[in-house]
Image (spheres, helix red, strand yellow):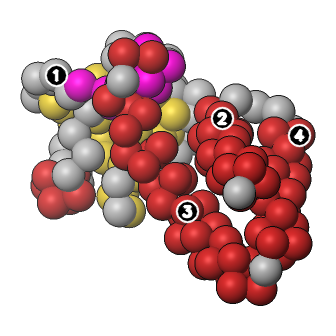
């Protein structure tokens, strides 16, 4: 009966190593150790009997995906997880407008380049900051531009030559 407990311990070690592999970059070394524990446990179950071996394989088939799902669900909620996972960016009033319908309304609008467009940069159209692509490849900061094309979320602008 002692060997069965050792096989269960190997299964638990496999689960712990799989969780570690998800969060620790090891180049697969931890995965190899996890699967060595798994196959060691299966081998012990096999040596004990066919019924135990089949039960061990069924437990392994259920355990591995379950452990990975639980690790991905619980880890981000832990104190350590919150410290290592990047937070989603918070949008502020005046940030770039990603809505395609609003961008289509800008077609033909005139604005000012807030940053140099090399060829991508930020432009201001009546208080709306929008990421734009320069048609000519480069537009200096504070130059007037007009929207000539809107393709999905890409706004293409042309520099207005001032005479």
Q: Position of residue 123 (x, y in %)?
A: 32, 28
**Magenta residues: mostly which secondary structure?**
loop
Mark 2 to mark 3: distance in Å? 15 Å
Q: Position of residue 11 (x, y in %)?
A: 68, 53
Mark 4 to mark 1: distance in Å? 43 Å
When the figure is inspected, residue 111 is found, relative to residue 108, above or below; the finding is above
Nearer the viewer's eye, disc 2 or disc 1?
A: 2
For marks 4 and 1 on the same chain, the one whose residue lies earlier in the sequence: 4
Mark 4 to mark 3: distance in Å? 20 Å
Neighbourhood count class around disc 3 (C-alpha, 10 Å): few under 14, some 14–19, many 20 upward: some
Judging by the rendered image, the residue that carries numbered circle 2 is 20
Judging by the rendered image, the residue that carries numbered circle 4 is 29
With 96 as the anchor, is 80 left or right in this view?
A: right
Secondary structure at badge 4 equals helix
For marks 4 and 3 on the same chain, the one whose residue lies earlier in the sequence: 4
Mark 1 to mark 3: distance in Å? 43 Å
For marks 2 and 1 on the same chain, the one whose residue lies earlier in the sequence: 2
Mark 3 and mark 1 in contact (Cβ < 8 Å)? no
Judging by the rendered image, the residue that carries numbered circle 3 is 63
For marks 2 and 3 on the same chain, the one whose residue lies earlier in the sequence: 2
Q: Residue at x 71, y 57 (%)?
A: 1
Judging by the rendered image, the residue that carries numbered circle 1 is 92
């Amino acid at each position: 009966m002692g060997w069965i407990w050792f096989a269960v311990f190997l299964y638990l070690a496999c689960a712990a190593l799989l969780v570690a592999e998800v969060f620790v970059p090891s180049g697969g070394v931890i995965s190899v150790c996890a699967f060595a524990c798994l196959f060691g446990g299966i081998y012990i179950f096999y040596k004990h009997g066919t019924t135990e071996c089949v039960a061990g394989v069924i437990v392994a088939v259920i355990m591995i995906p379950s452990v990975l799902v639980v690790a991905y669900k619980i880890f981000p909620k832990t104190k350590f997880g919150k410290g290592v996972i990047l937070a989603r960016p918070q949008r502020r009033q005046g940030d770039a407008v990603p809505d395609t319908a609003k961008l289509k309304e800008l077609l033909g609008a005139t604005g000012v380049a807030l940053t140099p467009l090399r060829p991508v940069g930020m432009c201001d159209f009546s208080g709306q900051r929008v990421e734009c692509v320069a048609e000519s490849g480069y537009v200096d900061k504070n130059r007037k531009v007009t929207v000539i094309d809107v393709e999905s979320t890409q706004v293409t602008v042309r520099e207005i030559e001032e005479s």
